[in-house]
Image: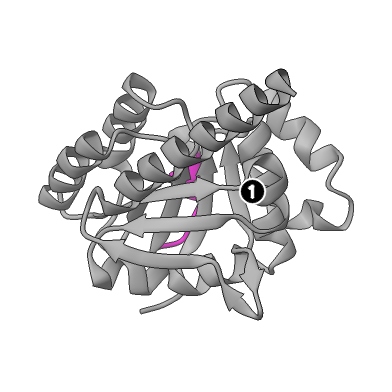
Amino acid sequence: MAQASMGLIGVGTMGSALALNIAENGFDITLWNLDLSTVDALIDGAGDLAPKLHKADDIAGLVAKMPSPRAIIMLVPAGKPVEMTIETLLPLLSPGDTIIDGGNSDFRETIARTKRVEAAGFAYLGVGVSGGSEGARHGPSMMAGGTAATYDAIEPALHAIAAKFEGDPCVAHLGPDGAGHFVKTVHNGIEYADMQMIAEAYGVM
């Protein structure tokens, strides 16, 4: 399968950082955000990476600018914004295209969305992304859920942008549909429990 062209919906703090990471690793990426001035600011400040960042005026324009097969990352708030974005994308996609949810979606919702997107003839990956904006810029840890074939098609790009430990990329295919977001949920629970424990210990000390 040919390398998928990359797109990103949601150019906030995380999205901007991830877009620069993707561009820095050699991929062109098409961008759309509800507030288009955010995209303009990102491109204006991207320096040598600016030629790899392409602005779309709306979601239809984003899809039209991207050759197939497409891999479109959503970095929008969990819940209704994800649903609305998927509903907008589905009529615009072509066979072989993949929607990637890189937000903190409920894994149960990711299971349902995977079934719906696959029934429409497209691929879906739910990817937990860890590391905050600094990680997104220089290498996040990523937890992917979806079919093996869907993951394999996107794996080269994920390997390129991921954090590295002793040369190995910090990304893995963890199972079907909601597996990636389930592991990210557990990860977040452990992380915030640790932070609370450190804060309380500091308070006592």
User: Relative to 162, is 85 above or below?
Assistant: above
Q: Is residue 103 visible?
A: no
Which type of secondary structure does the marked residue at label 1 adopt?
A: helix
Q: Is residue 41 left or right of residue 35?
A: right
Q: Residue placed at 66% from the left, 27% from the top? A: 201
Q: Quadrant of the C terminus?
A: top right
How crowded is the residue under tag 1: few (<14 C-alpha within 10 Å), some, or many (20+)? many
Whole-percent x and y of residue 32? Answer: 57, 35
Q: Residue furthest left?
A: 119
Q: Is residue 164 left or right of residue 100?
A: right
In front of the other: 55 or 169: 169
Under mark 1, the amino acid is Leu
Picture quarter containing residue 199?
top right
Query: Which region of the structure is painted magenta?
Result: 62-68
Q: Residue furthest front?
A: 205
Q: Quadrant of the N terminus?
A: bottom left
Q: Is residue 109 visible?
A: yes
Q: Residue placed at 70% from the left, 59% from the top? A: 23
Q: Is 65 within the magenta?
A: yes
Picture quarter containing residue 94?
bottom left
Q: Is residue 66 left or right of residue 31?
A: left
Whole-percent x and y of residue 85? Answer: 36, 30
In front of the other: 89 or 186: 186
State the residue position of label 1. 18
Whole-percent x and y of residue 193? Answer: 49, 33
User: Relative to 108, is 77 above or below?
Assistant: above
Q: Residue placed at 50% from the left, 62% from the top? A: 5
In front of the other: 52 or 118: 118
Q: Is 126 within the magenta?
A: no
Whole-percent x and y of residue 138? Answer: 72, 56
